[in-house]
Amino acid sequence: MLRRIFLQMGMLAGLFLVGAHVSAETQTDQTAQSNDEVVLTIRTSNGTQETTLAELTMKDLQAMPQTRFQTETVWTEGKQEFTGVSLAELVKRMEFGPGMLEAWAINDYLAEIPVTDARPEGPIIAYLRNGSPMSVREKGPLWVIYPYDSDPAYQREEIYVRSVWQLNRLVFYP
């Protein structure tokens, strides 16, 4: 909170002078807990220009139909339960046709996800893991998760690289 006040006043240097430094990761984790903060921006691109279609808050995502499944991942131990919005639901709501989605993380990691992956039994944009919100440190607040255990085709490196954690942006290319 103190850091936000100083930033708004344009006095970032004051934080370091008084020793009240708050790490960026801590600030991001705190911000992610607010249901009114934008956590996912959805854009479309024609290759030269992007247009913002939606800026979704956690509250917006939670208002959509939920999908829940259990699966093991290569990044966690044991079965995990993930809850979120199916990619199929999001693609349907945005009225995207055939094409490609770029999934961007907060650290600018980028993975391309074919729209054909957006099937009802396919990946979700998870916002809960084992019933709890995920902090940035825990790969949240949003994580593209495939139901790896449900289909051997999901247990390939090609799919693992599409499993973007700390997701904050989707860009659709027709």
Image (cartoon, rainbow, N blue to C red):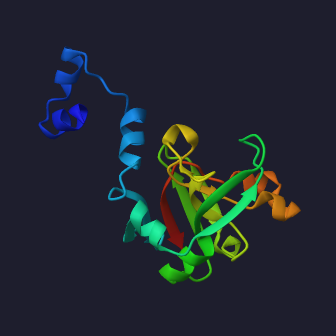
Name the residue at 17% across, 33% down.
Answer: 6
Residue 48's spot in the image, x, y percent? 43, 67
Quadrant location, the N terminus: top left
Asked whether residue 48 appears in the rendered view, the answer is: no
Residue 75's spot in the image, x, y percent? 71, 41
Name the residue at 16% across, 40% down.
Answer: 8
Residue 158's spot in the image, x, y percent? 76, 55
- Residue positioned most to the front: 131
Asked whether residue 140 appears in the rendered view, the answer is: yes
- Tag count: 0
Residue 108 versus residue 85: which sits nearer the camera?
Answer: 85
Name which quarter of the figure residue 147 lies in: bottom right
Quadrant location, the C terminus: bottom right
Query: For this view, does 136 lie left or right of residue 83?
Result: left
Name which quarter of the figure residue 149 lies in: bottom right
- Residue positioned most to the right: 152
Q: Compared to 42, does 128 lie above or below?
A: above
Query: For this view, does 149 lie left or right of residue 125?
Result: right
Query: For this view, does 68 lie left or right of residue 18?
Result: right
Q: Compared to 33, does 12 lie above or below?
A: above
Name which quarter of the figure residue 41 lies in: bottom left
- Residue positioned most to the left: 9
Residue 4's spot in the image, x, y percent? 23, 38
Query: For this view, does 119 lie left or right of residue 135?
Result: right
Name the residue at 50% across, 46% down.
Answer: 108
